[in-house]
Amino acid sequence: MEEAIVREFFDAWSLYDQVLNCNYMFHDELYQSVKSLLNQHYGDRPLKILDLGCGSARHLAPVLREQTIENYRGYDLSEVAIAKARENLAPVQGSIELRQGDLLAGLQETVENFDLIFSSFALHHLSLAEKNQFFTLAAEKLNSQGLLLLIDVMREETENRDQFFQHYSAWIESDWTAIAALAKESIYESIRNHDFPETVSTIKEMAKQAGFSTATEISRFRWHQAWSFEKNPDPVLCPHCLRTASNGLKCKGICVADNDY
Ligand SMILES: C[S@@+](CC[C@H](N)C(=O)[O-])C[C@H]1O[C@@H](n2cnc3c(N)ncnc32)[C@H](O)[C@@H]1O
């Protein structure tokens, strides 16, 4: 039932696209930081990527065009979002698979491992138990040097869910000036009934319990945050180019990571 309602909201994709057009949820800035991180962490290594709650992949697609993609698999409940993702991901080189379905079921049924498990503004739709399951399964399905990269709305440590709702909707009311009043009402209703954002400390604790040894903040804009999680971080061998044993980076001149330097 819950899933059907969330799917229905995102099947009416045009309102969410309007929010993206106005960059109200800071996608431009958040994905700029994702782009830098992927470049720094993976260099030009071919990547296997799982995107959970991919939506239209409107912001991830241009980032992926600049990486070497072996395989991208996206899951989303919304048929409309999947159709848009197919268009947006068409220019990305590599094998592209899009599956309509629940992200947790997708994570559970997958038998392969991935270099990057990515989820953007979807995790807050899950219950606390489901979020715990998400981190446990993500840790199992990541390659040893892989990254779990999470973008989502997070409550402030001092906010309970009601206070988050009051603060977030007051901000929408004052700042999302291009969205019509009636459309805002449907956004408030959706947040009130279907959004369950956690605090950063809860997210970090779930990740730790699941076996992630690092949690790194990539960027944050109000409640909208990007975090990366690693099980076995590769040591940085050169402070200039940030080369590790596996990311393929190297200084243009002499690199500290070379033995004879
Ligand atoms: C706010 S949109 C985010 C889309 C995109 N990732 C982005 O950052 O713009 C949330 C997406 O998550 C999807 N979604 C929500 N719950 C889901 C679930 N349990 N399984 C799969 N997709 C889900 C919705 O259909 C929607 O496309």
Image (cartoon, rainbow, N blue to C red):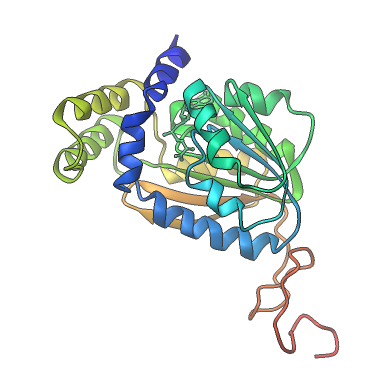
Q: Is residue 214 above or below residue 200?
A: below
Report the residue at 38% width, 47% height from top.
Answer: 224
Q: Residue furthest right?
A: 260
Report the residue at 40% width, 49% height from top.
Answer: 27
Q: Quadrant of residue 259?
A: bottom right
Quadrant of the rendering where the C terminus is positioned: bottom right
* Residue 58 point in image, percent of width and height: 48, 42
- Number of on-image labels: 0
Q: Is residue 146 above or below residue 141?
A: below
Question: Which residue occupies the foreground of this view, 16 or 164?
Answer: 16
Q: Is residue 33 left or right of residue 256?
A: left
Q: Residue furthest top?
A: 1
Report the residue at 27% width, 36% height from top.
Answer: 164
Q: Is residue 5 above or below residue 65?
A: above
Quadrant of the rendering where the N terminus is positioned: top left
Q: Is residue 197 left or right of residue 247?
A: left
Q: Is residue 35 left or right of residue 248?
A: left
Whether residue 156 is visible here, answered yes or no, is no
Q: Is residue 157 above or below residue 257?
A: above
